[in-house]
Amino acid sequence: MIICNKITNFLINKNIISINDREIYIYGLFVILYNAFLLVNIIIIGLIFNKFVFSLLFLLFWTPYRIFVGGSHCSTPLRCWLFFDLYFLISILLSRVMNILVSEIIASFLLLLIICSNKIENKKSFIIFFMIYFILLAIPSFNCKFIMSIAYILNSILTLHKIYLNKDII
């Protein structure tokens, strides 16, 4: 947060932004820098586990789902960071112990559970992700089905947690 304050104060001193917008810029900078940190962090973990491409594809499938569909959230940025790392490590583990067909079946089942719920907030966005998932599964040459299914399994667990428990994770 200190760096966000310094950048914002610099922009105010240079008359680039208004002092009235200070809190908005501090928050916006925090969100941008924090999310960049999370992305770089996952890529570093991917490199450590020799899963660089896996980490990029995981982020490719994970991020839009979380942005457009949502799901449970952690109560602090530190918990979010730790939980996201844990989820990514679980995804690496799942990629080693689960086969493609099982991942597709579990992801499909969880997606169906969500779509059948009357409590989902972003139903239109979710239906779009649901359709994209099944369209991509139907393309024989699409080689990223496994990583997509794992990302959707983990995201669906967070979404189901939000739908049925309606509270933060930790």
Image (cartoon, rainbow, N blue to C red):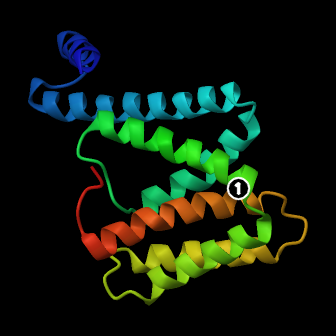
* Residue at mark 1: 147
On screen, residue 139 above or below 7: below
For label 1, the crowd category at 10 Å Cα-Cα, with few meaning under 14, some 14 to 19 and many 20 or more, is many
Rendered residue at 39%/86% (across/down): 117
Image quadrant where residue 152 sits = bottom right
Q: Is residue 137 left or right of residue 153?
A: right
Residue 83 placed where, x, y %? 41, 43
Above-or-below relation of 16 to 14: below
In the rendering, at what x and y percent does residue 149 appear? 66, 64
Farthest residue, direction right: 141
- Residue at 25% over, 56% down: 168
Q: Position of residue 31 (x, y in %)?
A: 33, 36
- Where 12 sits versus 79, above or below? above
Q: Quadrant of the N terminus?
A: top left
Please state if 75 lies on the left or on the right of 49 as rendered.
Answer: left
The residue that appears at 84% across and 73% down in the rendered structure is 139
